[in-house]
Image (tube, grey):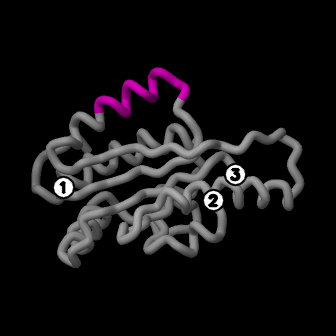
Amino acid sequence: MFHITILTVGRLKESYLAAGLTEYLKRLSAYARVRIVEVEKEGFTEKLTPSGREKIKKIEGARLLSRIQEGTFLIALDAKGKMLSSEEMAAFLEKIALQGKSRITFVIGGPLGISQPVLERADFKLSFSRLTFPHQLMRLILLEQLYRWFKIARGETYHF
């Protein structure tokens, strides 16, 4: 059984997203142990210099790195990462499992993205789209896709 951690910056505030997370966590319990770990989001104003943006990403990145467990396969959600179809991602997870890697951590950065040290630590960089999604909504999208990937891998039907 997979042990999946979703490591993310900031607290979830929207009740409608929390309800969706609860539903998908319940569905996923048949396939994997999934937990969500939040690290503190660094506050900032909208008018940041490029160096100010990097400083905040570095602080948040250090918080993320401190929570990554030894031996986990780290997948960073990054707009510049590799795009895979749902079927390709299901096959990728099966390949990881066959290599004996049952602990997987997905990392979702804050509003400014993921720091370079976290990206360098990642074993794989995954892009869901060329579009930008709010980091809190990305949690729900990731959980839905995890559920879809497990259904595909087991040959079970799921609405497409």
In this rendering, position of residue 107 left or right of residue 36: right
Residue sitting at x 11%, y 49%: 156
Secondary element at image label 3: loop
Q: Position of residue 3 (x, y in %)?
A: 27, 56
In the rendered image, residue 15 lying in the magenta stretch gets the answer yes
Foreground disc of the pair 2, 3: 2
Secondary element at image label 2: helix
Placement of the C terminus among the 4 image quadrants: top left
Judging depth in this view, the residue of 68 and 140 nearest the camera is 68
Q: Position of residue 4 (x, y in %)?
A: 32, 54
Q: Position of residue 34 (x, y in %)?
A: 30, 47
Residue sitting at x 58%, y 66%: 118
Magenta highlight range? 13-23
**Taking 140 as reference, is 22 above or below it?**
above
Label whose residue precedes the other's in the sequence (1 or 2): 2
Residue 112, label in figure? 3
**Taking 126 as reference, is 159 above or below it?**
above
In the rendered image, residue 38 lying in the magenta stretch gets the answer no
- What's the amino acid at mark 1? Ile
Location of residue 18 (image quadrant)? top left
Label whose residue precedes the other's in the sequence (3 or 1): 3
Residue linked to disc 2: 61
